Amino acid sequence: MQRYYIFLALLIGVLGLNGCTTVIDAKLDTGPIRLSVEGILTDQPGSQTITLTTTAPYFDNSTAPAATSATVTVADDAGKTYQFVDPTNTGKYVWQPAGKDTLGHIGRSYQLTITYQGETYKASSKMNPVPPIDSIIFVKRKLNPLSKTEGYRAEFYATDFPNRVDYYRIRFFQNGELQNKPRNIITSQDGVFGSNSSVADGLAFIVPIRRSVNPDSLYALNDVVKVEVHSLTQDAFTFWQQLRTQITNGGLFATPPANVPTNIINTNVTGRTATGFFMTSAVRSRTASVVQANIRVRED
């Protein structure tokens, strides 16, 4: 009887909560419009793009307005300046190479300068080295221990540089499509998770990192898988970590949202601040198909 009354009391409480639902229309003050910068430059051949937009109200789900009529340049520490132009007037500022020239070179430092609506913004980044990907293999697995659905789990192999602290971002593509869910923001320090990486310095990337390049449904036979490893600075590594934290911040135990750090600095200390990030990455990639030659038998 005592358990019956406890159950009844809980049921009444739940029904009471459901019956008292109130819709709250939150009205937030609109803050000042600020410049937002998305700039990731690499050492890969081809054009490079820096995207400029402006911020919008918190509940505005429309495409961010383009920031047009800006002057955008990138200068390296070897004395070369690269001009970025926006011929389509869409806020996408592009540098086109001459012949086989590439913008990014490992070991060089780069400074971005943006002049927009009377304000001048600057940011800097160094292009650090990145190790090659030795191989990609596939192992046949069930989707989960209770599932009858089977597929192939990918695993890539790369080795961290010894005697230095290195920061990486890993991206992967399935049949040419970038896997871009929040959980696919994969970062690593010296081939491991976390900041205590001294025990892994110079060793192969750990298993969870190597196996992080899998979609929710696993791969199918003849799928084409491309894996990229990008070098990062420490600041860019922190940016990607905090960005993932903010866009996955939900549920019962969510914390109050916070601004993700930026390295875009207004040269006028009393001027409008900016958002976004400028980074440079050396990139190494490898592509493999889910075919018999790349499939292995593993017990784990």
Image: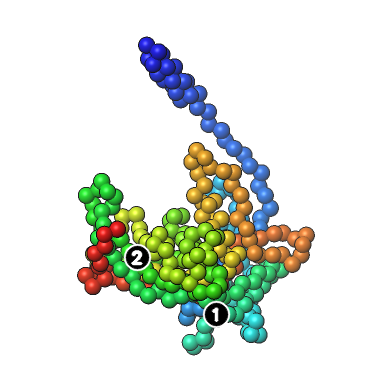
Horizontal and vertical percent position of residue 108 = 60, 80
Give the residue type that dot 2 points to.
Answer: Glu
Q: Nearer the viewer, residue 131 or 116?
A: 131
From this view, report whether residue 114 is shown above or below residue 271.
below
Q: Residue at x 31, y 55 (%)?
A: 217
Q: Residue at x 54, y 80 (%)?
A: 106
Quadrant including the C terminus: bottom left
- Density class for disc 2 (Cα within 10 Å; few <14, some 14-19, many ≥20) is some
Q: Is residue 3 left or right of residue 261?
A: left
Give the residue type that dot 1 points to.
Answer: Ile
User: Which secondary structure, mark 1?
Assistant: loop
Q: Give the alpha-carbon distance from disc 2 to disc 1, as whole Å.
A: 27 Å
Horizontal and vertical percent position of residue 185 = 47, 59
User: Which secondary structure, mark 2?
Assistant: strand
Q: Nearer the viewer, residue 92 or 165?
A: 165
Quadrant including the N terminus: top left
Colour setting = rainbow
Q: Quadrant of residue 7?
A: top left
From this view, report whether residue 258 is shown above or below residue 273.
above
What residue is shown with label 1? 106
> Residue at the front extreme?
199
Disc on res. 155 = 2
Horizontal and vertical percent position of residue 195 = 55, 60
